[in-house]
Amino acid sequence: MSEPDVLERAATEFERAMQRNIKGLGYFSSPAPVLGTSPKDTLISRGTLRLYHYRPLSDEVYRVPILLVMATTNRGYIFDMLPGQSLVEFLLKAGFDVFMIDWEAPGLDESHLGLDDYVLDFLPSCVSRVLEETGEPDITLVGYCFGGVLSLLWAALHPGLPLKNLVTFTTPVNFKGMEMFQAWSDKRFFDVDRLIATHGNCPAEMLYSAFDLLRPGARIAGNIRLWDNMWNDEFVKSYRMFDRWSTDMLPLAGRYFKETTEQLMWDNALFEGGMEIAGRPVDLASITAPFMHVVAEHDHIVPYEASRHLVPMIGSEDKQEVVLKGGHVSLIAGGNAIKRLWPQLDLWLRERSV
Amino acid sequence: MTDKPTTDPFSMFRDMVSQWEQAANDYGSKITSTSEFAQGMQGATAISLQIQQAVQDGMTKVLAAANIPSRDDIAALSTRVAAIEVQLHRIVEALGAQSSKSSAPKPKRTKQPPSGHK
């Protein structure tokens, strides 16, 4: 670096250091950002289950409503972070009628809930309610992560029902491909029955620790980067938004956690065969609606090996896998998603939603 | 963009953080994905669960002696409240009383994709 460059750089860093101190104080004294504020109506509020209808932002919408299905481990506001950074808002502005299945923390009285409750009660109830609300005969389901698994199970078990399109994001099907989770839930050492007998539900703290352990250096490096970028309002806003969401995890209902551990993590039954919900065999080949699966190139939670087999297993003729740059979360929210996933989703859905 | 090596110490520090993070993640993953780690982690969890279970059992007896409801009693009450909630929900649905429903006019469901798009 030449001498003027050094002086200019030193002046910039000095300015940033000053800003860091001033804004750092503000950071610790201000509340976390309010997320998920797009206007909506609650159509179903039953125990852990919520069904929301977002208020349309245009006078004319596509005929087929979209139902977003959130993963059961996290809050649905990842789809609706802040104005300008909200997938829900983007879809509403693009002319879609948007609904979302979201979850509250299941209480101890809901520890008996199992996969069958989610797949044969919660999802069908929400689909019926959306059809009733819109007066339409069919629906598009968009599932994220385990919300995608639930959507697949529902679709496979209800082949006669009105599924117009199915979209899944970062959805695992070969659970042997999730190597870290496989190691930690090794059936020789992991006593899932004792965990549930003691806690009733699988505690959110345990899930949070497991996700955190996937990238042991990320939290420390993230804090260093936050300090380094404390002068940058946009960086801080984005950091707080994602930090709040990623720490806001939900416990899982006891029986549901036990069944997913046994059937999916241990037996890998969805991929290897033998998956059953309430005694009914699941065959993904029975799904014939147009299908799109979007996976992230750098997904550390659902690696490609866990998700890449999904599209070939689906029976639809109109089906495709889309691999986009990004990670498990940045695929669907934030700057990366705004540039990559959202326009792709809009393009794919619009011609299939009339 | 150029790949020429930088002499900027601030930039070097940022690169160093990224490299450290990558190394920590790689090394951490290598350690935590071993069956020895899983055995140790689950062993510690099992001990913790045993202790919690023992404390819970002890507390239940103490609470019963003091005539104070235990967690199970509260959970049983919660189950009954939840059952009432479900019934209420069904009644509300049956009556069509959608109090939270927006009164705004519904949009027309006739939108077509823009012509000429792929």
Image (cartoon, coloured by chain):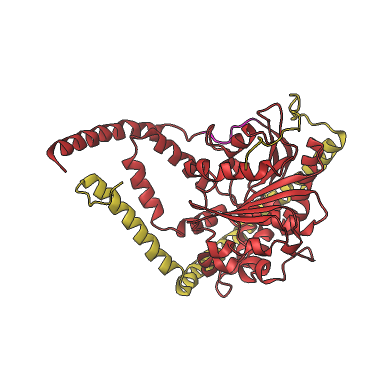
Chain colours: A red, B yellow
Q: Residue at x 24, y 45 (%)?
A: B10
Q: Residue at x 62, y 41 (%)?
A: A346
Instruction: Specify whether residue A210 is in view.
Output: yes
| A262 or A52: nearer the viewer | A52
Name the image quarter holding residue B22: bottom left
Q: Magenta span has A342?
A: no
Residue at the image point whose x is 77% and y is 47% from the top? B80
Taking A86 as reference, is A109 left or right?
A: right
- A127 in relation to A279, above or below: above
B90 to B5, vertically: above or below: above
Image quadrant in which the C terminus of chain B is located: top right
- Residue A35 image point, x, y percent: 55, 35
Answer with the quarter of the image where residue B110 lies. top right
Residue A120 in percent (x, y) is at: 78, 55
Left/right of residue A5 with respect to residue A94 in the rendered view: left
Quadrant in which residue A86 is drawn: top right
Q: As rendered, which of B70 and A344 lies closer to the eye?
A: A344
- Residue A112 visible in rendering: no
Q: Residue furthest right?
A: B95
The rendered magenta stretch, by its main secondary structure, is classed as loop
A227, A142: nearer the viewer: A142
Measuring from the top left, give residue A166's x and y in whole percent: 69, 51
Residue A37 magenta: yes
Q: Which residues are magenta?
A: A34-39
Residue at point 45%, 70% (across, down): B37
Q: Name the residue furthest front.
A: B116
